[in-house]
Amino acid sequence: MSQFVYLYRGAERGHSPEKMQETMQKWMAWMKQLTEKGHIKDIGQPLEHTGKLVKGKQKTVTDGPFAETKDIVGGYTLIEARDLDQAVELSKGCPIFEVDGAVEVRPVMKMNM
Amino acid sequence: MINPSDHLFRREAGRMVSTLTRIFGVHNLALAEDVVQDAFCRALEVWKFHGVPENPSAWLMATAKNRALDVLRRERTARTFAPELGRLLESEWTVAPVVEELFGANVIKDDQLRMMFSCCNPRLAEEAQVALVLHILCGFSVSEIANAFVSSDAAIEKRISRAKKVLAGSKRLFDVAGADDFAQRLPAVQRALYLLFNEGYHGASPESAVRTELCQEAIRLTALLLEHPLAATPATHGLAALMCLHAARLPARLDASGNLSSLFDQDRSRWDSRLVAEGQRFLDLSATGSELTEYHVEAAIASVHAMAHRTEETDWGKIVSLYNTLMTIRPSPVVALNRAIAIAQHEGPERGLEEISTIANRDRLATYPFYHAALGEFEFRSGRHKIAREHFRQALVLARNSMERRFIEQRIGACQRAAL
């Protein structure tokens, strides 16, 4: 088994309360399913959409620039899968696609290549 | 996990926006709505990783409270907030304790009432008041309301944004402590809730889930009225009674194969006996004072139906006399039609036809499918099957959804079989 990180990109706004509750329930059902199949190594954390950017030799601290709202990473999950293909396949159940979001699937680099 | 049928987010949206508007002032309604949206986004992000908290309502309210404090601190120099709260929000000294107090459980209940009375502004048409109540207090989106009213998103959007402008321009929220103004505005609020309930009960939306939800929202808001001493009048009790007694029948409105079932054919064992009992209790409580409202009379009619275990046991004489009373309080062609139907049950179909022919403003019923269906039914029972079929065909053209169409098609089928 190899490890992968899912980076969830895209913020969901402007939906009705009912729709948002539905979306949340779909997320929880999807994560539960991955957990039951033993694919979740670490469920991860949600991330605030704001923060600071520390950059360069001068270590300048700014409020950004961050990516556009639709590209901001809103959270991550550490996944275990056979290979990249399976990790991609598993990500397709993520409800983020219903609201035009994206999942970035990145293999974790291994020590023993 | 939240039970999806709980509509937690929708319900909390109304509570949060009412309280936030109380703090920010009614002119900042849009800001309050933004903060509510933020709270839901937060819940969505956090709960999907960490699970639903033990008390999700409290979590959402606390999040809204913290965001409100952020907004107040950040924008207090740029904006003015609720004039009623004066300078309390301006000083760092008082802002936190005041906001804390305004988020107290009892205050939140009053905030919803305040919002309800504010939405029923006499400058708004009744249908705009109902849409506003659904949008702000019940958390329905524009397209959810359009779906329930079988209207276009654009039409509802226009209705709601206009209504919001009137509300936001009203300078301050309705003062629920002023007894005189309160008594004056109360009938409009009752009427809006009555219309909201009717939209669910008789409305054109083909989805029974939508209709049940509208009825439930009307009942929830009426229950809120009943908790306020000035609002818990006999008329409000009458309104609550009529909602309970009608809602009790909802489970039987569709038969086993999903077809619309008329009051006469319903399997009455499927009526919700708990709601019937609740309705009877409210009806008893409504019987004080001297005022007789249409809510009293409509509840009394529903109660006569609820008392009959079988259609044949219905006391039609009593129902006819209640409709006579209703015609003196709030006459309308639809009430007159229902009266004619009761007379037909009591004295035969020919009498029903006679009564229908005397309805004033009968032309206003011309587009109402059940007017033609009633004519068809009486002709059918009088043995004139071909004429009956013509009326049902007319009703079919006017039917508003597939359930109504199926119901009428079955009657046409019965006419054709009988005419053979």
Image (cartoon, rainbow, N blue to C red):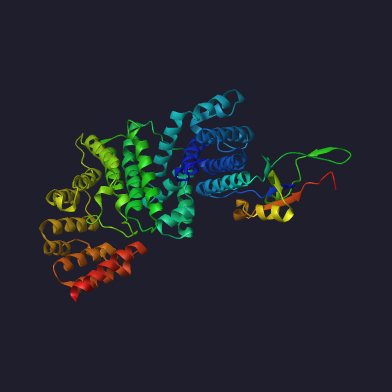
The answer to whether residue B91 of the structure is visible from this angle is: yes
Q: Residue furthest bottom?
A: B420
Where B215 sits versus B288, above or below? below
Q: Position of residue B50 (x, y in %)?
A: 61, 37
Q: Position of residue A65 (x, y in %)?
A: 76, 46
**Total marks in image:** 0
The quadrant of the picture occupied by the C terminus of chain B is bottom left
In the rendered structure, the answer to whether residue B120 lies left or right of residue A2 reads left
Figure quadrant of residue B299: top left
Q: Residue furthest left?
A: B347
Identify the residue shown where x is 34% and y is 48%. Answer: B197
Figure quadrant of residue B405: bottom left
Where B150 sits versus A59, above or below? below
Front-most of residues B316 and B151: B316
Identify the residue shown where x is 60% and y is 53%. Answer: A99
Where B415 sits versus B66, above or below? below
In the rendered structure, the answer to whether residue B249 lies left or right of residue A94 reads left
Front-most of residues B340 and B34: B340
Q: Residue furthest right?
A: A57
Q: Position of residue A28 (x, y in %)?
A: 58, 44
The answer to whether residue B401 of the structure is visible from this angle is: no
